[in-house]
Image (cartoon, rainbow, N blue to C red):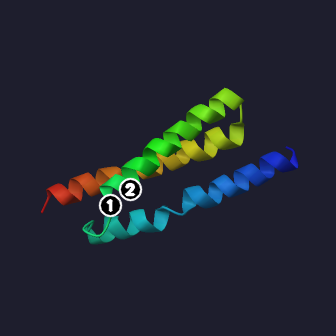
Amino acid sequence: MDLINVVGLLAGTCVTLSVIPQILKVWKTKKVKEISLLTFSALTFGIAAWIVYGFLKNDLPIIITNSVSLFLNLIMVYFILYYEKEK
């Protein structure tokens, strides 16, 4: 693996992991009042676009890290919709 792919994977991993503390907090507290559905929806759409871009460029680090990120952000969107509905 070349340096470019290592840097891409490292950067993508950092961005991908950044949402995990928020997911864990919502999961434990079941509170989403302060979290914007619009923001997470736009972010999720953007991540999906990055995956398409990664496929078009045949760029594995972009595809892998954004696929994981998409999954995590979809969990967050689900939590926002689910816990907001419970109120």
Q: Quadrant of the N terminus?
A: top right
Residue at x-position 58% and y-position 40%: 50
Describe the element under mark 1 as helix, strand or loop.
loop
Residue at x-position 70% and y-position 31%: 57
Disc 1: which residue: 36
Furthest toward the right, the residue is: 2
Q: Quadrant of the C terminus?
A: bottom left
Disc 2: which residue: 39
Tell me the crowding category of disc 1: few under 14, some 14 to 19, or many 20 or more residues within 10 angstroms, Cα based: few
Tell me the crowding category of disc 2: few under 14, some 14 to 19, or many 20 or more residues within 10 angstroms, Cα based: few
Query: Residue 2 appears at what percent x and percent y?
Result: 87, 45
Query: Residue 65 appears at what percent x and percent y?
Result: 61, 47
Choose between 68 and 4: the one closer to the eye: 4
* Residue type at the position of mark 2: Thr
Residue 76 placement: quadrant: bottom left
Tell me, yes or no, if residue 52 can be seen here: yes
Residue at x-position 28% and y-position 57%: 80
Q: Is residue 65 left or right of residue 37?
A: right
Furthest toward the left, the residue is: 87
Disc number for residue 18: none
Q: Is residue 38 left or right of residue 53?
A: left
Residue at x-position 82% and y-position 48%: 4
Q: Are marks 2 and 1 in contact (CB under 8 Å)?
A: yes
